[in-house]
């Protein structure tokens, strides 16, 4: 069963490949999240504007000139690398957010407890990792998020913080509205690369080529904790970002944005 879940997760992520292409494939506010990187060190152009997202309490970066980064991980299953990643975060004193699905919390309660104990945020990646853009029923939408909330509370004894990331970055304007009405902040990303194919992992050079020059003030970084490469390069990657003058802050800080730029 777990093998089928992993396979489904990888297949779903394949549809999400366009996020790191040099050109975004969509310019509409519905569908899939897309980015177009224009210039090194500058924020990418996204397929929904900050203003459009803000009305639904949704973000993909923080509007700031300050050199700050928000590090986030998505995880649909455990691949043996998360604890090494947690070791690096602890060593570097970097806060992170882990967006988890139901299977992960159910199968890896000790790792989830460690995330919480070490001060990281566990965000809502839905219970079953569906294409949320295809869900128009408020009841079904709520069930996906509330079922995960319940498992998280049962596992950790804590109330889940209200951060939501749509699986594959698939969303609709109605989804954003429903998440907002549930008290959630929807968090997309402004920096990512193709790191989720278990048997086609990027090289160290590829990771650094994509992730170093594209760093920008207020970036929300998306990595996958299932990636062997990420577990091997994260320590050096964080150090290089720090050498560039960047500091890391928890997602809670993202909500302190006072203005939105175009």
Image (cartoon, helix red, strand yellow):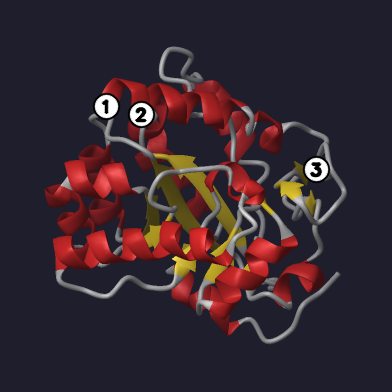
Residue 241's x, y, as percent? 51, 50
Q: Check disc 2: other Cα within 10 Å, few if <14, some if 14-19, many if 20+.
A: some
Q: How many marks?
A: 3
Picture quarter with the C terminus: bottom right
Give residue 228's quadrant in the image: top left
Tell me the distance, in whole angstroms, between the alpha carbons under discs 3 and 2: 31 Å
Q: Work out whether 72 lies above or below 25.
A: below
Picture quarter with the N terminus: top left
Residue in view at x 81 percent, y 51 percent: 47
**Residue ID for mark 1:** 2
Kindly identify which numbered label has been placed on residue 5: 2
Q: Give the camera-side residue of 240 and 43.
A: 43
Residue in view at x 27 percent, y 34 percent: 78
**SS category of the residue bearing label 1:** helix
**Residue ID for mark 3:** 36
Kindly check if marks 3 and 1 are in contact, taking CB atoms under 8 A apart as contact: no
């Amino acid at each position: 069963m777990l093998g089928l879940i992993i396979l489904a997760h990888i297949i779903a992520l394949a549809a999400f490949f366009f996020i790191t292409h040099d050109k975004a494939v969509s310019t509409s506010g519905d569908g899939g999240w897309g980015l177009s990187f224009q210039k090194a060190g500058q924020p990418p152009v996204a397929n929904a504007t900050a203003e459009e997202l803000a009305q639904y309490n949704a973000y993909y970066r923080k509007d700031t000139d300050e050199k700050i980064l928000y590090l986030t991980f998505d995880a649909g299953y455990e691949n043996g690398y998360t604890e090494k990643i947690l070791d690096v975060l602890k060593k570097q004193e970097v806060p992170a957010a882990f967006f988890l699905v139901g299977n992960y919390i159910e199968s890896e309660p000790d790792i989830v407890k460690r995330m919480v104990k070490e001060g990281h945020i566990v965000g809502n990646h839905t219970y079953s990792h569906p294409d949320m853009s295809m869900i128009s029923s408020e009841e079904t939408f709520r069930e996906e998020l509330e079922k995960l909330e319940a498992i998280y509370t049962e596992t950790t004894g804590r109330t889940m913080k209200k951060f939501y990331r749509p699986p594959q970055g698939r969303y609709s304007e109605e989804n954003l509205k429903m998440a907002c009405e549930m008290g959630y902040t929807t968090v997309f990303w402004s920096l990512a690369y193709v790191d989720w194919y278990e048997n086609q992992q990027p090289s160290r050079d590829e990771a650094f080529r994509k992730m170093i020059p594209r760093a920008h003030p207020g970036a929300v970084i998306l990595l996958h904790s299932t990636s062997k490469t990420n577990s091997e390069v994260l320590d050096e990657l964080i150090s290089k970002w720090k050498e560039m003058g960047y500091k890391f802050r928890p997602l809670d800080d993202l909500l302190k944005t006072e203005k939105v730029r175009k």
